[in-house]
Image (spheres, helix red, strand yellow):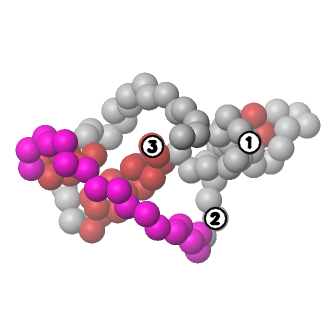
Amino acid sequence: MENSKNYEILKGEIILRTGLHIGGISGTKIGGVDSPVIKDPVGMPYIPGSSLKGKFRSIKYLLDNQKEESSDLLDMFGRAGDTKKEVLSIGTL
């Protein structure tokens, strides 16, 4: 798969069938919340794209019965643990 600028926007709904925890460690402090929720700058809870990417990557890896990272997997998701500093910006048009 070659690196191209052809992207598709996928829209959908995520339905949780099991528990979900995406949060920090602040809940482990005395008096802290048991399970803090990640929120965007305007206070809305969200699932970070990096968490979705990691989940999709691990599902593809398992479904493909991979012993190693295939070139398709690397092209789609990069190497496990790679992070890029991106900025979230909320605005109106």
Category of crowding for the residue at label 2, using alpha-carbon neighbours closer than 10 angstroms: few (below 14), some (14–19), many (at least 20): few
Identify the residue shown where x is 44% and y is 28%.
86
Q: Which residue is mark 1?
A: 43
Residue 10 lies in the magenta-colored region: yes
Identify the residue shown where x is 9% and y is 49%.
1
Element class at badge 3? helix
Q: Separation of disc 3 and disc 2 at Cα?
A: 18 Å
Q: Which residue is mark 2?
A: 19
Residue 80 lies in the magenta-colored region: no
Element class at badge 1? loop
In primary-sequence order, the first of circles 3 and 2 is: 2
Query: Which segment did they paint magenta?
Result: 1-17
* Quarter-of-image position of residue 42: top right
Q: Separation of disc 3 and disc 1 at Cα?
A: 19 Å
Of 42 and 93, which appears nearest the observer?
93
Q: Where does the C terminus fall, quadrant-wise?
A: top right
Of 9 and 64, which appears nearest the observer?
9
In primary-sequence order, the first of circles 2 and 1 is: 2
